[in-house]
Amino acid sequence: MSFHNKPSKKDSKKQESGIEQIPINNAANFFPIKEWYVYLLVFIFTFILYSNTFHHQWALDDGAVFNENVYVKQGSEGYGKILTTYSMHGVKINPEAYQYRPLSLLMFATEWEISPDNPTLYHVLNVLWYALACVLLFIVLRKMFVEKNKLLPFIITILYASHPMHTEVVANIKGRDEILLLLFILSGIWFTLHYIDKKKSVFLAGIFISFLLAMFSKESAITFLAAIPLTVYFFRKAERKDYIYIMTAISIPVIIYLIARFAVLSDYTSSELSTINNYFAEQTLLTRWACAIMLLGKYLLLLIFPYQQVCDYSLNQLPLVGFGSWQTLLSLLIYVALIIYAIRSLRKKSPVAYGIFFFIITMSIYSNLVYLIGASFADRFLFIPSLGYCMAIVYLLYQYADKKSTQQASYITPSRLISGGLLIIMLLFFTVKTYTRSTEWENNFTLYGADIKKSENSARLNFLWGEALRDKAIEYQNKNNTPSPSAVLEKNSLMYRAYLWKSILAVKKGIAIYPKHANAYDRVGFAFYSLHPYYPKEGFLDSAVYYYSRALQLNPKSIITQYNIAIAYYNKGDYENAKNHYLYVVQSDTSEHVVRFDLGSSYAMLGKLDSARYHFTLYLQKHPEGAASCYSNLAIGYARINQLDSAIAMSKNTLNADPYNVSTYQLLSQIYSFRKQSDSAMLTINTLIALMPDNPTGYIEKGNLFRQINQADSANYYYMLGKSKQP
């Protein structure tokens, strides 16, 4: 059926059964629903489909655009920085490839100002924008298929709205950039078709604004430099000057964006892509192409049969292949056949051919054929290209249903039953799959826990799963910060340790796949360090230092790892190494005033009290509330080098600042005891007991004092009393 065939004007007839014989193309009768009702139906369907995400938390890389992004958290005050820096600048991330997508970040900053740290708001808005985009899609399709029944664009829209491969974009708040891209691209197409129909310059202005916003949403809008004229060719008869005006209205926003992007990113140099992000990045050109073609075939498979969705497909989940691989050859054959079919159907202006061209053009930027991008494969890359598939498959079934229908044909024919049945099956499968998949996006723990079963050989997913397990462990640790029965506290403690062990195993599996990931070693080091207090004889501090050291071998400039290894060394009593790593941190980032305290403490333990005082002074300038801790560490430092008068003076300064500092009472008592000043020692401990009668430390220290003067009965009495005070 030619796309431009109009419905027959012959009078309709009736069958013997009395059912009016109306072909599908009769828009007035076959789908007799008012346009506004269809808009509402599309909106409600889409909104309800993703309504289970409204109470979701942060997931995947939401932190990069929300709770970890200082510019977003500044609200409207962060607009300037968002517009003049690369997208990840607000989280102090130096990516391999710098991006400039300010529009979604501006929206997030506005929303954060309205309701800070409220993922529910952002999830609702994501679904709202997506539902509106789907309504606009129906409107645009009606404009494209102007001579067809509105059932055709309605089915395309519903199929697109429910496609499971879109869940990553809609359920992940960061996917707002893709949704905005879709919204503005569709508005651009709408203005384009209206301009062709009415030749009014106001529609050219609409095209300009739409594509300017689309480009500042996501740079992949540039593919519509080809897709827009293609749309005009297939769905309108346009003159050459129309193409010139339209291309000018599209090209100027692209140029404006590229100039702005260059101005913002010109000072940054992208590094070479790592294998962890694009698994064939370090392969030969032929291997890259073979892998890319194979993955294009996988995209087609997931469009037709979206059997699974995964948030990460990195090394080593997808295979390295050559041109001898059957997957590559089959994919190549399918694409060649599709392209040949589309070219041969070009003159007929078949919507199926349009869908093929649309898919290939919009997919090209993600194909890794022209140039390598920051990911080898991702569900979200199908968000825009899948529209071409939905148009092609629905129109094929539409043609099949209508190919034998004439005005003498009945409504119900075998071809219509088959087409309708297939569409219903697809829609039901898509809807159920989308709803269940979006449920998995509740938070990192549910997402990575579900996906690690489907992508168990992905190095990065193992790393991410390990981090989620660590975060789950911390949740149980935090539960013990509130008063609870001892059985509950013990259970929380056991769960904390169990999840830390699971975290270690997951991250180690990732390291076995990709041993060059510095952060992974840091995560294992952190887990071992956290387990040390529970297993002090197992050498876990040594394990922590080992993994931190491995991380620094790969990334010696990591301030976080430098700080972590310093803490581990300090707790081992290796104050020299602790001092060196703390020193690196404060020299790398002079704003890290808290580290001045740690550095001062290291100097104090080394007996270098002048250096300790210097760093404590710098620390106290920003944190005067930390005076007691500084005095306490100076007291310990003086005691370690046997300057006991100074140690006593600093201990008294500590207690003046913090009368409830238990360890300082212990130190002061021990110094007096060492000096044979038993009365002063006893007075110090009695003061501690008077202040904190429920704390066991005072009674145990008093028992120690009695033991030193050979009063065993009194010592045992206070030991028992102290034991009775222990939880």
Image: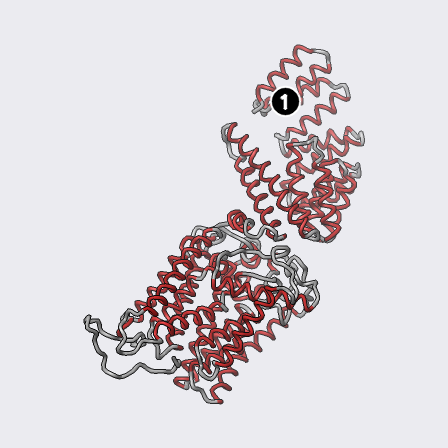
Q: In x, y percent, where is residue 663?
A: 67, 29
Q: In x, y percent, where is residue 383?
A: 49, 65
User: Observer-nearest residue: 179 or 280?
Assistant: 280
Q: Which amino acid does label 1 sit on?
A: Gly
Q: Looking at the image, how many numbered discs can be counted on the residues?
A: 1
| In-image side of 39 versus 324 (left or right) | left
The residue located at (48%, 50%) in the rendering is 442
- How was this image coloured? secondary structure
Please state, as top left, top right, bottom left or bottom right, where the C terminus lies in the image: top right
Q: In x, y percent, where is residue 666?
A: 68, 26
| In-image side of 294 versus 619 (left or right) | left
Up the image or down, 7 lies above or below 683; here it is below
| In-image side of 217 versus 539 (left or right) | left
Residue 669, quarter of the rendered image: top right
Please state, as top left, top right, bottom left or bottom right, where the N terminus lies in the image: bottom left
The residue located at (72%, 24%) in the rendering is 670
Q: Is residue 84 something that shows in the picture?
A: no
Q: Is residue 520 something that shows in the picture?
A: yes
Up the image or down, 429 lies above or below 604; here it is below
Residue 548, quarter of the rendered image: top right
- Disc 1 marks which residue? 698
Other residues around mark 1 within 10 Å, as few (<14) / some (14–19) / many (≥20): many
Up the image or down, 602 lies above or below 162; here it is above
Q: In x, y percent, where is residue 56?
A: 46, 51
User: Observer-nearest residue: 498 or 723?
Assistant: 498
The residue located at (45%, 78%) in the rendering is 206
User: Observer-nearest residue: 186 or 675?
Assistant: 186
Q: What element carries label 1?
A: helix
Up the image or down, 345 lies above or below 324; here it is below
